Amino acid sequence: MGRVKKPQQTKQQRSKELSMEILSSWSLKNKSWEWREDAACLGMTGDIFFGKLGYNQKHIDAAKAVCKSCTVKRACLEYANDNVMTHGVWGGKTPAERLVLLGLKRWPVS
């Protein structure tokens, strides 16, 4: 008898599965992740959003360009603010911009 082949996952499915594994391991205030299904960045690498290529204005502008037309950027921004995400572009905002929105001078230490 032959072995049954497991159907190959799409890049989008693998990304969602990995995201859910990470989320479940974190202690987050806001675990709502459903908005991610409709995010303009779904399936993209996090390089431009989290500075893996060097966090400079070019990458920030590229990340914001993706966010600009995203239909769920408000939910993304709320997620980042609720969970005190201190790095990366979330909802089209940098960490410094999110601090201003929250009326903070610096990120709280956990």
Image (tube, helix red, strand yellow):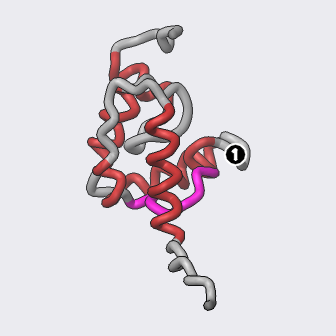
State the residue at coordinates (51%, 79%). Answer: 7
Q: Secondary structure at mark 1?
A: loop
- Image coords of residue 11 (percent x, y): 53, 69
Q: Is 51 above or below relative to 86?
A: below
In reply to whether residue 43 is colored magenta, the answer given is yes
- Image coords of residue 31 (percent x, y): 34, 35
State the residue at coordinates (51%, 73%). Answer: 9
The outermost residue toward the bottom is 1
- Image coords of residue 87 (percent x, y): 55, 31
- Image quarter where the N terminus lies is bottom right
Q: Is 17 above or below relative to 101?
A: below
4 or 13: which is nearer to us? 4
The segment highlighted magenta reads 40-47
* Type of amino acid at the residue the image marks with label 1: Lys
Q: For mark 1, does the 10 Å Cα neighbourhood hold few (<14), some (14 to 19), or many (20 or more) residues?
A: few
Q: Residue 93 appears in which quarter of the rendering?
A: top left
Residue that badge 1 annotates: 52
Q: Is 52 above or below relative to 68?
A: above
In reply to whether residue 29 is colored magenta, the answer given is no
State the residue at coordinates (50%, 11%). Answer: 106
Main secondary structure found in the magenta portion: loop
The image shows a total of numbered marks equal to 1
- Image coords of residue 57 (percent x, y): 62, 43
The outermost residue toward the front is 1
21 or 80: which is nearer to us? 21
86 or 56: which is nearer to us? 86
